[in-house]
Amino acid sequence: QPSAGEKAWDIFLLDYAIDSPLHVVFTPTAMQQYDRAFAFLWRLRRVSHGLASCWSQQMALQRHLVTYSPRVGSRAPELRLEMRQTLHKCSCLRNEIHHFVQNIHSYIMCEVLETSWAKLQAGWQACIDLDQVILEHQRYLSCIEEGAFLAPRTEPIL
């Protein structure tokens, strides 16, 4: 249920029904860790989408300014210049933020998730009992949390 100011997209999560015997590996704690990682990646995607939408609005505003700026420019040339400079600064800022968000997303997908998954698969190959499988899975989730700055000790970085 969304809180005040939240939309459904802000609290969207995947919910899996884990049956026996998988519930031994995919414990409620592990599922909470997956939820946190998913929520973080989902927020990154939402920010990226919002920035793309912002770009579309900026382009429409810029086209509008080009169309009507001769009328404004003849009456107040300094206003026209200030509007163009402000739009340019906004566009540069949006580009920088989008670049940053894309880099974080790429880092998490390539450097965190892919490498953690490869380590998990290699670790599972060496497992000889269920306790080792559970331990490897916990290490995998810890790696993801640490790498994505979602672990309690690294969370202040975000």
Image (spheres, rainbow, N blue to C red):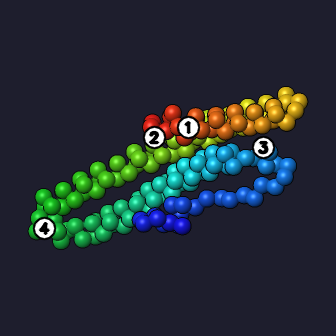
Residue beneath the point at 87% across and 32% down: 129
Q: Secondary structure at mark 4?
A: helix
Q: Which mark is nearer the camera, 3 or 4?
A: 3
* Quarter where residue 78 is shown: bottom left
Where residue 53 sits in the image (x, y, percent)?
44, 62
Q: Where's the C terminus, which quadrant?
A: top left
* Image point (45%, 37%), residue name: 156
The residue pinned by badge 2 equals 158
Q: Is residue 21 visible?
A: yes
* Tag 4: amino acid: Ser
Q: Going by the image, does 105 lie left or right of 54?
A: right
Distance from disc 1 to disc 2, alpha carbons, whole Å, reads 11 Å
Using the numbered discs, state the Cα–Cα distance from disc 4 to disc 1 in whole angstroms: 58 Å
Looking at the rendered structure, the secondary structure element under dot 1 is loop
Identity, as a three-letter code, of the amino acid under mark 2: Leu
Among the two numbered marks 3 and 1 on one chain, the one whose residue lies closer to the N terminus: 3
Closer to viewer: mark 1 or mark 2: 1
User: Mark 4 highlights which residue?
Assistant: 74
Q: Which residue is mark 3?
A: 25
Quarter of the image where one finds residue 106 = top right
Mark seen at residue 131: none
> Which disc is residue 151 wearing?
1
Determine contact: label 2, label 3, CB under 8 Å: no
